[in-house]
Every structure is written in C-alpha cells, then in structure tokens.
C-alpha cells in the first residue's frame, strides 16, 4: 500500500508530494513562481538559490517579501510553507552544531511563521 501512495510521503492539495529538504522545496518554489510578476519571480529565485546554498537568513528574508505580496495562489502559498518547513530542520541542526548564523536565521524564520 505504501508503494502506491508514494512511500508514505504526504501530498498537498495539488496532489504533489511535499518536499522533504530545502533543495526540493527550492525547486518547487521557483517553479510555481515562474509566471509571477518580475519582482516576485526574482525574489523566488533569490530564495531558491539561497536555500540550495544554505544561506537560510537570505532565503527567509526573500520568502518574507514574497509572502507579503498580494495575489498569492494556493499552490504558491504551499510552496512558501514547504520551504519554511524544509529549512527549519536544517537550521535547527546547524544551530545544534554551534552555527551562530543559523540562530539568526531561526529567529527570522519564527517571525515569518507568526505572520
């Protein structure tokens, strides 16, 4: 049964499998914002690139800008959410390893989640 359901990975409202790591989330984020307004598309690109490189503070800041915009579709909102969730685990692991930059990114991430 698990094989039929994508090995137990959850699917979102659009039927896509929820990304598990920042790289997968970055790809999805950039894909769903391909046809967005140029500034939004650019910020999605910045967020995706930063997520892939592990520059989580920059990624969170770009996500905040995107999320504060208007006319966000359900699919785009889910991509933002999955990006935040995927980054959170990586950021926590980095903080536990003593990365002070990760601590700053985590504070920004908590702020983003509250809004």
Image (tube, rainbow, N blue to C red):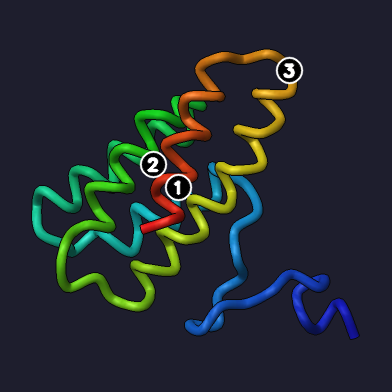
**Quadrant housing residue 94:** top right
Residue 85's disc is: none
In front of the other: 115 or 68: 115
Q: Is residue 47 left or right of residue 72?
A: right
Residue 51 percent across, percent down from the top left:
46, 36
The quarter of the rendered structure image containing the N terminus is: bottom right
Determine whether label 2 and label 1 are within 8 Å by CB: yes
Mark number displayed over residue 26: 1
70 displayed left or right of 55: left
Quadrant where the image shows the C terminus: bottom left
Q: CA distance from mark 1 to mark 3?
A: 23 Å
Which residue is at a point 38% across and 36% down the rendered structure image? 59
> Between residues 10 and 95, which one lies in front from this camera angle?
95
- 3 and 2 marks in contact (CB < 8 Å): no
Q: Residues within 10 Å of mark 2 (few under 14, many from 20)?
A: many
Q: Residue at x 33, y 64 (%)?
A: 32
Q: Which residue is mark 3?
A: 97
Tell me residue 57's x, y (percent): 41, 29
């Amino acid at each position: 049964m698990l094989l039929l359901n994508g090995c137990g990975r959850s699917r979102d409202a659009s039927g896509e499998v929820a990304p598990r790591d920042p790289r997968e989330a970055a790809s999805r984020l950039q894909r769903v914002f391909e046809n967005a307004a140029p500034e939004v598309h650019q910020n999605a690109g910045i967020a995706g690139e930063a997520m892939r490189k592990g520059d989580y503070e920059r990624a969170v800041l770009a996500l905040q800008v995107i999320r504060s915009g208007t006319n966000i579709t359900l699919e785009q909102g889910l991509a933002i959410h999955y990006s935040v969730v995927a980054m959170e685990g990586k950021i926590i692991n980095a903080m536990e390893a003593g990365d002070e930059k990760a601590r700053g990114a985590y504070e920004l991430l908590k702020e983003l989640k509250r809004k």
